[in-house]
Structures are given as C-alpha cells and as structure tokens.
Image (cartoon, rainbow, N blue to C red):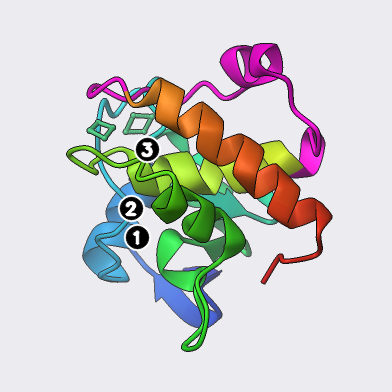
C-alpha cells in the first residue's frame, strides 16, 4: 500500500506501483488541472511539486511517490488571492490554448526559487517546458514580472 499526500490530503494507493504519478493525480485524486502532453518527460505539461521539487509526474512511478508530499496547480491559489506567478501570468496575458500553462506555472515557481533574478538566457536555458502555441515571449515577460513580485515579497 502506497501512502502519499496530494494538496494536503492523505491518499492510499493499492495498485500498480509502476503506474505514473500523473495518472494518480488525474484519475484517483481527480485533479485534472495537471495535464498529459507527451508522457515521456519531455514537455512539462504534467509538472507538479514533489517534496518541494518540480517534477514531471508522467515519469514518476507510484513506487517513487510513496510518502511524498505532492502539490498541484489546484493548490496554488487560496480563496482570496491567486499565487503571484498566476497574477503575473494574467497581467501578461500569457495563455493561448492554455493546455501547457499549469505545468509552465508550476515549473516557474521552482525556477524562480533557483533564479530569483533571471536573465532571458537563464529562462531560455533552464525553463524547459514546451508550449506548442509558442507563448515563449509572453512567458518570458511574465517570468520577469513574477520575479519582481517575488522580490517585493508579494509571494502568497
Ligand atoms: S506529459 Fe509529462 S513531460 Fe510531457
Ligand atoms: S498555450 Fe497552448 S500549448 Fe502552451
């Protein structure tokens, strides 16, 4: 039996230990904000935080998630306020089709912890989630805006 926490809620899983964590998040925990893109760890649409790290959940078998603390896009905003990265995304009007965006935002939060003052080159090199709509310019602007909010202590 695998025990794990998703968005602060305790879950048990008694199935295939090789099943990707992404399936568990979408089907068992019913958190469909986390998306399936490539299924092979390349696109980042499935990005969640596992024990404080950004991971591509399509490539994490359930066995590896045993005892983990998982946070998804659904856990970011509280009832009063969106997360500062979400606010930066809205201000820069980033999403086009929107499919990749929950993964982009989850990746950005951890990217900004590592690069609080990112250059465009840092973003291009280390923010590696794929957007099929090509929203990269808008995203770059949103990441810089979020970095400023983070610096101002607007993190929620
Ligand atoms: S669906 Fe996981 S990286 Fe693409
Ligand atoms: S906004 Fe459409 S895939 Fe990124």
Q: Dot 2 corresponds to which residue?
A: 34
Mark 3 or 1, nearer chain start: 1
Q: Would you say 79 lies left or right of 122 here?
A: left
Q: Where is residue 62 in the image (x, y as percent from the top left)?
A: 45, 50
- Residue at figure coordinates x 77%, y 44% from the top left: 113
Q: Quadrant of ligand 2?
A: top left
Residue 122 belongs to the span the image colors magenta: yes
Residue range of the region highlighted in magenta in the rendering: 113-134
Q: Residue 103 carries which label?
A: none
Is label 2's Cβ within 8 Å of ligand 1?
A: no
Counting from the top left corner in percent of width and height, residue 2 is at 49, 65
Instruction: Give yes or no for residue 114 being in the magenta stretch.
Output: yes
**What's the distance in space between the residues labelled 3 and 2, CA to CA?**
10 Å
Residue depicted at 67% across the width and 72% down the height = 156
Say whether disc 1 or disc 2 marks the residue closer to the N-terminus. Answer: 1
Q: Of the numbered discs in the image, which one, if any, rests on residue 58?
A: 3
Who is closer to the viewer here, 18 or 117?
117
82 vs 38: above or below? below
């Amino acid at each position: 039996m695998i025990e794990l926490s998703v968005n602060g809620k305790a879950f048990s899983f008694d199935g295939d230990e090789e099943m990707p964590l992404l399936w568990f998040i979408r089907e068992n925990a019913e958190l469909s904000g986390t998306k399936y893109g490539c299924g092979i760890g390349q696109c980042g649409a499935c990005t969640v935080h596992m024990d404080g790290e950004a991971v591509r959940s399509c490539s994490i078998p359930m066995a590896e998630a045993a005892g983990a603390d998982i946070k998804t896009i659904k856990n970011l905003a509280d009832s009063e306020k969106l997360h500062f990265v979400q606010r930066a995304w809205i201000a820069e009007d980033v999403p086009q089709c929107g499919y990749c965006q929950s993964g982009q935002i989850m990746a950005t939060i951890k990217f900004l912890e590592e690069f609080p003052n990112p250059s465009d080159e840092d973003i291009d090199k280390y923010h590696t989630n794929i957007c099929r709509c090509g929203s990269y310019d808008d995203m770059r602007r949103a990441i810089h805006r979020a970095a400023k909010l983070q610096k101002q202590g607007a993190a929620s």
